[in-house]
């Protein structure tokens, strides 16, 4: 049996690579929305703790996904650390378990009730892998995966219990997060088409085939923005609308439409990987836009810094097979 040091820099790097840091912002911004809209101001220490959990927690979920989806990854992403052995399974389990326990401990200190949503995200992540056997169910489960982050962020700041589920502002934000991540999953499945088909996954892309599914691209990328129409029609939300929010949302809309165009043009092949950069960027910016309803200045800083960071971190992963 090959011996290895699970604390070696090579294995640590392989684990971080498997976490796919460019995806941290999807959960990070969802959690921050809860913080911003909870009605109370978070201390610096509490804010750092919350963001650390929601950022790193999503990275742990990516490693868990790789472990559960090894069969299809051997086809779709044969160069991923877990597939090649650069990240031993034992090390992946130990690191993931350690971070999971640490995140749970931090959550318990912040608000024990928030553990409900903390555990829910991880349970939904496991369910997600198996939900891909049913067309559209995988998209729906993936969308619901990140919605608890909104409530998690709010609960960790205001100290409330499950009554946060009755907060209309948080509910609308959770719906927005669900819809944008259903869209994210739709485009992600293009890249995974070959392996999913061979291993029996029945995603919507497998069911329709990429060449047929691409005709739904523009419709799917528009659906999340229907939430904005609700904002325009609701008297309560209309009072918060401002040009910053509308401008940021317009840019996000253009990016998601460009994503739809790229996957229409390249529904198969290596470009389905590189086009994901726009998919993830558009989704993160969509979530970030809502912060402008409360704090336009903060939203502006986060909007452009998130765009730069997501693109920079994605470009570090140039291998389309990893």
Image (tube, rainbow, N blue to C red):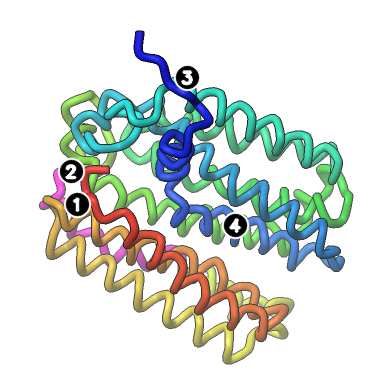
- Mark 3 or 1, nearer chain start: 3
Report x, y in % for residue 62: 45, 39
Which quadrant holds the C terminus?
top left
Report x, y in % for residue 30: 61, 58
Secondary structure type for disc 2: helix
What residue do we see at 59% from left, 46% from top? 56
Kindly identify which residue carries mark 1.
213
**Residue 222 located within the stretch drawn in magenta:** yes
- Mark 3 or 2, nearer chain start: 3
Q: Image height check: is 133 above or below 26?
A: above
Q: Residues within 10 Å of mark 2 (few under 14, many from 20)?
A: few
Relative depth, front residue between 138 and 53: 53
Secondary structure type for disc 1: helix
Disc 1 + disc 2, Cβ < 8 Å: yes
- Mark 2 or 4, nearer chain start: 4
Number of labelled discs? 4
What residue do we see at 68% from left, 38% from top? 118
Kindly identify which residue carries mark 4.
28
Query: What's the mark number on residue 208?
Result: 2
Q: Is residue 206 left or right of residue 248?
A: left
């Amino acid at each position: 049996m090959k011996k290895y040091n699970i604390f070696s820099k090579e294995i640590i790097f392989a684990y971080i690579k498997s976490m796919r840091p460019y995806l941290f912002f999807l959960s990070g911004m969802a959690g921050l929305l809860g913080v911003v809209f909870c009605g109370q101001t978070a201390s610096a220490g509490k804010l750092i703790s919350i963001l650390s959990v929601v950022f790193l927690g999503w990275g742990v979920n990516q490693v868990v996904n790789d472990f559960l989806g090894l069969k299809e990854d051997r086809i779709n992403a044969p160069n991923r650390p877990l597939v090649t052995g650069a990240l031993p399974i034992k090390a992946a389990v130990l690191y993931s378990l350690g971070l999971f326990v640490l995140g749970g401990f931090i959550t318990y200190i912040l608000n024990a009730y928030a553990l409900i949503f903390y555990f829910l995200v991880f349970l939904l992540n496991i369910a997600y892998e198996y939900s891909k056997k049913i067309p559209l169910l995988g998209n729906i489960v993936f969308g619901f995966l990140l919605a608890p982050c909104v409530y998690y962020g709010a609960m960790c700041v205001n100290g409330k219990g499950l009554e946060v589920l009755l907060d209309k502002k948080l509910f609308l934000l959770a719906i927005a997060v669900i819809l944008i991540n259903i869209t994210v999953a739709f485009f992600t499945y293009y890249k995974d088409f070959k392996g999913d088909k061979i291993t029996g996954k029945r995603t919507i892309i497998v069911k329709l085939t990429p060449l047929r599914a691409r005709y739904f691209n523009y419709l799917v990328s528009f659906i999340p923005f229907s939430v904005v129409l609700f904002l325009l029609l609701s008297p309560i939300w209309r009072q918060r609308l401002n040009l910053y929010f509308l401008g940021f949302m317009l840019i996000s809309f253009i990016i998601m439409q460009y994503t739809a165009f790229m996957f229409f043009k390249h529904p198969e092949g290596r470009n389905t990987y590189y086009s994901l950069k726009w998919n993830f960027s558009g989704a993160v910016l969509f979530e970030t836009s809502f912060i402008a309803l409360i704090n336009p200045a903060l939203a502006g800083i986060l909007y452009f810094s998130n765009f730069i960071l997501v693109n920079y971190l994605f470009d570090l992963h140039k291998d389309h097979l990893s």
